[in-house]
């Protein structure tokens, strides 16, 4: 009965999320439903467990969500992000249209721009390019996913996306963890994704399919006309600043290990146990603040009439609240489920996956499964690491395995089954592109399967070579 209650709760959460209901509302409802079916007192489960774990998550990661959202919104409203996207797409041209859209998304996300902003920045130019090249519009969402939702989100070392930040606080690693495996897996993913999408394009051409007749959210842009946007070389300055400053702060700045001691002595709640658990977050905060200031200084003159830096900052701040609350609610949900008697059987089954004699397969299976259940890479990974990272880390230490490979596998596995149909970013992407799941999701799902497979390929690559 205990396991059934958990499964029923998960199914209900997936169904409601797919139908567009907010997990902020329904994650606690279905968590408490499962708790009641397992005779766990409802009100303490809500206030002392669900809320406590959610608040702990917010304490750790809200600055990254907030500053990342503000940075992305300023890059969007000043036109700096669009300037970069336009230059890449126009420069590569119609002969390499799919590569151009993929590369535009990859450059922006690797520079710290949020995936949601990338969708809005890239789509208008992608639509214009695909229309001129007569490539089916239904392939645009998949091309954007390949560029923004894959290697530069969770694979390539140093990416400042949240999916690469979260493991640092659990494993004491940095965002440059396991660079060989990250580059290896990310390269395979981008390469196989481009091969697949180009194959789909050639198949469409053979069957006589073109761009198609579309009227929903169809941009009135032509790439052969002048578009008043900031120059690309101006736009990349804030992106490079985020990457370079973050790298310097992590690898060269001498952080004082005793910095936390005065705060630990105050017996404050939720103080980090060790400075290595927060260095990556502190470094990214500093890098994003400088990136924001640069974007504001370089782009404020390009803000269209009716807009302002204040509006951009406010919109980013409000957007970050929704993102962090969604993920915190999923973390709270996972911890309530973990407290139920039935979860012991589930966790034991997951920890019993000993393929290769390491925790990596267990970790990959758990993270990608929860990412699929929650429809969120960050949410699924946060739940998994919050519940089981200590066990995986202890297992790794017992066999002399570096926590860096645990970091990279967790990050890449989070970008596996997360892009199922109920994923919020996928729903937003399709709405922006003016397409439906029926029209465009098939190719996104193919990339989802590739993303999931590559996480396991990286595991076996490490087991075979020992490289990370």
Image (cartoon, rainbow, N blue to C red):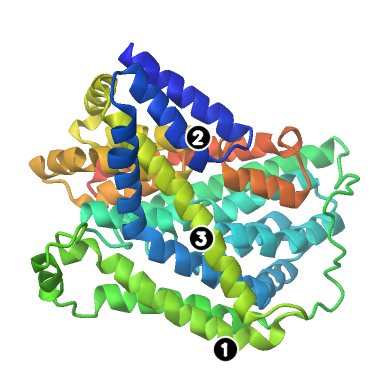
Sequence-first tag of 3 and 1: 1
Determine if residue 262 is in view.
yes
Q: Position of residue 194 (x, y in %)?
A: 61, 49
Sequence-first tag of 2 and 1: 2
Give how far apart the Cα atoms at labels 3 and 1 are. Answer: 22 Å
Q: Secondary structure at mark 1?
A: helix
Identify which residue is drawn at 48% across, 47% down: 326
Q: Position of residue 82 (x, y in %)?
A: 68, 71
In the rendered view, tell whether residue 401 sits above or below residue 68.
above
- Give the class, few, some or many, for how many residues have Cα within 10 Å of label 1's Cα (few <14, many ≥20): few
Determine if residue 459 is in view.
no
Q: Position of residue 438 (x, y in %)?
A: 74, 32
- Kindly identify which numbered label has been placed on residue 320: 3
Q: Which residue has dot 1 on it?
A: 297
> Foreground mark, 2 or 3?
2
Quarter of the N terminus within the rendering: top left
Identify which residue is drawn at 42% across, 43% down: 329
Quarter of image, res 139? top right
Tell which of 139 and 341 is nearer to you: 341
Tell which of 31 and 464 is nearer to you: 31
Identify which residue is drawn at 57% across, 74% down: 313
Tell which of 86 and 76 is nearer to you: 76
């Amino acid at each position: 009965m205990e396991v059934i209650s958990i499964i029923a709760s998960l199914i209900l959460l997936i169904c409601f999320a797919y139908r567009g209901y907010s997990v902020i509302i329904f994650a606690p409802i279905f968590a408490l439903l499962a708790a009641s079916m397992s005779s766990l007192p409802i009100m303490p489960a809500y206030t002392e467990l669900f809320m406590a774990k959610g608040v702990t998550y917010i304490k750790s990661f809200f600055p990254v969500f907030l500053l990342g959202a503000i940075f992305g919104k300023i890059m969007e409203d000043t036109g700096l992000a669009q300037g970069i996207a336009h230059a890449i797409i126009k420069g590569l041209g119609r002969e390499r249209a799919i590569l151009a859209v993929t590369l535009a998304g990859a450059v922006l996300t690797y520079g710290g721009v949020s995936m949601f902003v990338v969708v809005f920045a890239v789509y208008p130019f992608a639509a214009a390019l695909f229309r001129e090249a007569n490539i089916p519009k239904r392939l645009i969402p998949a091309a954007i996913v390949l560029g923004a939702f894959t290697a530069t989100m969770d694979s390539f070392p140093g990416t400042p996306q949240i999916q690469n930040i979260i493991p640092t606080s659990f494993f004491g690693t940095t965002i440059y963890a396991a660079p060989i495996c990250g580059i290896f897996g990310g390269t395979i993913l981008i390469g196989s994704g481009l091969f697949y999408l180009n194959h789909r394009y050639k198949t469409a051409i053979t069957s006589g399919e073109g761009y198609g007749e579309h009227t929903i959210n169809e941009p009135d842009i032509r790439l052969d006309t002048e578009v008043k946007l900031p120059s690309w070389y101006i736009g990349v300055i804030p992106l490079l600043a985020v990457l370079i400053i973050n790298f310097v702060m992590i690898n060269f700045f001498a952080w004082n290990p005793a910095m936390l001691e005065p705060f630990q002595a105050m017996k404050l709640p939720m103080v980090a146990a060790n400075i290595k658990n927060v260095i990556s977050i502190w470094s990214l905060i500093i890098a994003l603040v400088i990136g924001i200031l640069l974007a504001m200084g370089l782009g404020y003159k390009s803000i269209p009439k009716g807009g302002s830096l204040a509006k951009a900052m406010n919109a980013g701040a409000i957007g970050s609240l929704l993102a962090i609350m969604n993920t915190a609610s999923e973390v709270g949900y996972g911890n309530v489920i973990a407290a139920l008697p039935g979860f012991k059987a589930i966790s034991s089954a997951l920890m019993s996956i000993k393929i290769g004699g390491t925790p990596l397969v267990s970790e990959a299976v758990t993270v990608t499964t929860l990412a699929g259940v929650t429809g969120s890479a960050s949410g699924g990974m946060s739940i998994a690491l919050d519940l089981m990272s200590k066990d995986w880390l202890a297992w790794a230490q017992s066999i002399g395995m570096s926590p860096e490979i645990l970091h990279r596998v967790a990050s890449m596995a989070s970008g596996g089954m997360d892009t199922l149909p109920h994923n919020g970013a996928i729903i937003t992407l399709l709405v922006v592109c003016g397409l439906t799941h029926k029209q465009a999701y098939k190719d996104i799902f193919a990339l989802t399967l590739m993303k999931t497979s590559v996480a396991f390929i990286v595991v076996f690559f490490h087991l075979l070579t020992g490289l990370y």
